[in-house]
Structure formats: C-alpha cells, structure tokens
Amino acid sequence: MGLAIGVDVGGTKIAGGVVDEAGKIVARTRRETPSTDPAAIVDNIVAVVRDLRQDNDVEGVGVGSAGFVDAARATVLFAPNLAWRDVPVRDRVAAATGLRVVVENDANAAAWGEFRYGAAEDVDDMICVTVGTGIGGGLVLDGSIYRGAHGVGAELGHMRVVPDGHLCGCGNRGCLEQYASGSALVREARALASSRSVFAARLLELSDGDPDAITGPMVTGAARDGDEPSRELLADLGRWLGEGLASFEGRLRPRGPSSPRGCSRCPTATPMPSPGRWSRAPPATATSRPGSCSRISAAGSAKGSRRSRRCSTRRCSSSAEVSPRRATCCSRRRPQPSAAI
Ligand SMILES: [Zn+2]
C-alpha cells in the first residue's frame, strides 16, 4: 500500500489528507460541510479527493464520518449533525473517483489512528473521545475496534447524563454532547448574550450585538483575551467533559487514553480544562481498581508531528515528560496489528 487519502467529514468542515504508510500526512486540504444537503456533502468529499489526487498517486480513500455507520462500513445510517440518512457514501464516492473506499465512524477512525500511530501506540485497549460539533467515541479492545452488534457501538457522546435534559440530534434528551461539545458551548454563549447580561458584554461586542452571530472561535478568543464569562463557559464545558470521561474510564477501565481533540469550531489551540476538572473518577483503591493511563493526544497539531506527553497513571509517580513513542512508566508493548481499517 502506498499513499491513501483520509477524509474527515465533520459538522462544519470536510478535512482531507494524503497519508503514507507510516501515517505521515504529506498533503492537506479542506472544504465546508454543506450539512443540510446530503448530495452536496458527497460532492464536497469527491472534490477533496480530486484536489488531493492532482499531485499524489493514491490507492484508496478512507472516509471518517460523523454519525452511525453500518457494519459493512459502506452506508451512513444516521448522522445527528448532518442531513445524511441511509446514504451509501462508500459506493457514491467510489463511483465518482474510481478508487477503493472505506467509510468509518469518525471517532472510530480517530481511535484507530491514535492506536496505530499516536497516543495509544503502546497499549491494547483504549477509549478515544473526540470533541467537535458533537462528541464522538471510539473503543479499541484487545487490538480491535469495537463496533457493537450493528456497527454503531461506542457512541459515547449519546450517553445520557441529564434526564429530560437538552434535546439531542439523535432524538434523545440529555446526551453528554449536549453539554460538552462545541455546539453546547455556542448554545450557552448565545443564551448568555440573549439575556443582555453585563457578563456578555465582550461576546456582544464581538458579534456586533447579535447573540445568534456568536461562534465557538469568538468564545475561545475572548477567553484567551481574559474575558472571565467566556472562560467560565469553557470551564463548564470542561466540567461536563470531565464527568463523561470519568464515567467512561470508571466503567471500561482501559489502559490507553481518553483523548480529547480541539473543537472543530475553534482554533487548534482551544483551551483545555484544567487537570482538576478531569479528575472526578470514582473512588478507587490500588488493590481493587488498577490504575489506567489518561493522555491528551496531539490530534490536530501542525505538520502531523507527535508531541511528547506526560504519563498520568494513577499509581505512577513519574512527573517527567515521556517520549512520544514510549511511555516508560506504563508501557506494555503489543504485537503490531495485522490490518488497518
Ligand atoms: Zn444524543
């Protein structure tokens, strides 16, 4: 296998890259997601592939899509943040490009990327949580992606955290992604601004007085500039994210990371919750609950480079930065997986 194209279809953007056998991204491009037009989304995926093929001899395409993907990895059954309903994405992109195409849930694809080349390359089990327009989840268990009985397992963002809470795009109420995603951040910021509270002065200034014009980057930008209400909005999002991660970690007990990414509506340097907001795991004892390892991945960082990271294994006393390729205090080498997605 030589070069392949990976396409990430999110709620607001379609990002594409050419990737070599070592997982290095050698070319990139992106387009907007026309999220309310099912055919136009496919057209933009095809356009991204065509753009990237102009200077690269590629052999296949992997499409990572938000939403529920069938077990055959061909059809997007339902996408809460896109207009896709039973859309045969694999066949349509293959017909338009003449290339072999695989469709995968975007969080599963992110999990597999971290497992093969990133933060979880030295473990057998991991949870990957992607934070963007919604909340995605991917599980790698004993070296394999977990898809559940119908291909739509590990939708961690749709775990209910508030009975009768906010209505979610999946049709249920109170899902985690209604409290810990980019969409939640924007909804809360607009609600604050609509109240014409003095605390929303900076956000209203940035949006020319229109609460509905407030975007995620406006909130993160204001937070970086020291606007305390914007910081509180992000902190609240971080608290919910921490609650969710603690629940996942406490029940699944992976050895690998819960791995938040930058919000798709925000710059890559999105402020992350403080460590204290991530540490609400259930009480544990060293004898009854062996520690797991949580790491923040470098997904979205420039030039595809991997960062060194700090091991935070509960029973690990190391505070030193560890190599991107080797978590010296909690390493457990595994055989190289035989097949990619
Ligand atoms: Zn939901």
Image: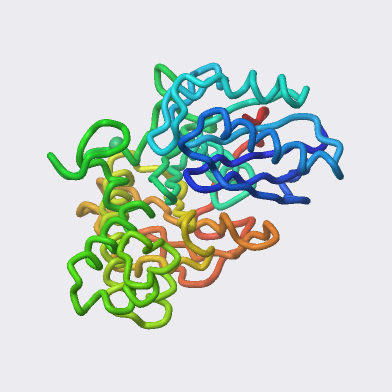
Residue 57's spot in the image, x, y percent?
86, 37
Split into quadrants, the picture shows ligand 1 in the one at: top left
Residue 135 image offset from top left, x and y in percent: 38, 45
Work out which quarter of the rendered image holds the C terminus and state it: top right
Question: Where is 145 relative to 321, above or below?
Answer: above
Say which residue appears at 48% left-offset and 58% top-offset: 262
Q: Is residue 134 left or right of residue 105?
A: left
- On screen, residue 204 above or below 90: below
Question: To which quarter of the image does residue 302 belong?
Answer: bottom right
Q: x and y percent of residue 19 in the render? A: 74, 44
Quarter placement of the N terminus: top right
Residue 190 visible in image: yes
Residue 304 drawn above or below residue 76: below
Instruction: Tally the marks.
Output: 0
Q: Which x, y percent locates residue 129? A: 42, 46
Give the residue furthest to the bottom. 226
Question: Residue at image x 46%, y 72%?
Answer: 319
Q: Is residue 61 left or right of residue 279?
A: right
Q: Residue at x 70, y 38 (%)?
A: 47
Viewer-closest of 167 and 24? 167
Work out whether residue 139 can be spotted.
no
Instruction: Between residue 296 and residue 91, name the one nearer to us.
Output: 91
For the point 46% across and 47% down, the residue is 256
Q: Quadrant of residue 3?
A: top right
Vertical order, 185 against 61 (above or below): below
Nearer to the camera, 258 or 314: 258
Q: Where on the picture, by quarter, is residue 298?
A: bottom right
